[in-house]
Amino acid sequence: MPRISTYGSQNSALMDLMRAQQGVFDAQQQVTTGKKATDLKGIGHKAETLSASRASLARSEAYQEAATRTASFLESQEIALERINSSMTDLRVAVTEKQGDFVYGQVEDAFYQVVTALGARHSGGYIFGGTRTDTNPLTISSLDDLQALATAGDAFQNSDRRPSVKLDETVTVETGMLADEVGQEIFEIFKRIADYEAGPNGPFTNPLPGPQETFLINEMNNVVTAIDNLLAKTAQNGNAQANVDTIKQSHADRQIFLNIMIADLEDVDMAEAVTKFEQAQVALEVSARTFSTLSQVTLLDYLR
């Protein structure tokens, strides 16, 4: 009977030692990683909440990244719109010089600036191409090309759909403007001037004769209207930028909240974890001494 009891005690001590070793390992893992467990199983009944929180955080981060890319795109679009507006403003001022060759030179320069802006790219895609970002939205590159077309509308080949991006579960934002909706009114002005220059009443001369001056003044009134419309589009772009910035901040705030929630679920209190580790080490030492003591009791001791 004593032998059975001794071996039973040894087995119990061994189990205690193994549990103590596991306790030290678990406590050491918490101190090392700062986490309560290395997998969801270790979190227990809070695992579902933790999993959902992590998924929500990942979605928010993805949406915020999309918002960041969108903000960058809108900034490039704003630069292009302002470049067009600046060119048209310079053209409006130039007509006051009343020097035909100078005015037409300004027309050509302004047209080049507008063409460059409408053909601008962002991250490899054409800004004003709509959903057709791989193709230049313009079919022409010079004022002569425009003059040769039947209508100004023939100068555009952008898609008829604006690009859009999803920035939240319920928020989808149209981000891009189309080349024809931005530039067709302007191209019609350029084409009328180019047609006049190439027609029976042209070319423009120095100083401008009365009919040519009257024609250009009328077109400059059209330029003023086009500038007003450009300003409205620039304001629309600005509103979109403000909206995207608000969404970005919303995601940043949400991520702070979710990170705090996740930390509460999976992070350990380091002071508590260190104390637990020290206690586990003490328990291991006690179990090891107990097992060592019992292991010295052998069958031979009972046969003497």
Image (spheres, helix red, strand yellow):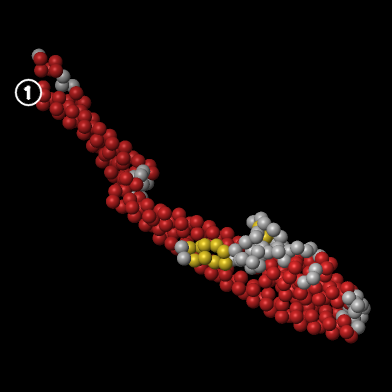
Residue 284 in view: no
- From the viewer's perspective, tell me whether residue 28 is left or right of residue 118: left
Residue at numbered disc 1: 1
- Quarter of the image for residue 204 reads bottom right
Q: Is residue 15 or residue 300 the one in the foreground?
A: 15
Which residue lies most toward the front here? 150
The residue lying at 21 percent from left, 32 percent from top is 15
Q: Is residue 141 or residue 105 the one in the foreground?
A: 141
The residue lying at 49 percent from left, 66 percent from top is 171
Quadrant showing the C terminus: top left
- From the viewer's perspective, tell me whether residue 55 is left or right of residue 161: left
Residue 241: x and y in percent read 57, 68
Q: Is residue 152 or residue 119 the one in the foreground?
A: 152
Give the residue type at disc 1: Met
Residue 100: x and y in percent read 89, 77
Give the vertical position of 199 relative to 144 (above or below): below
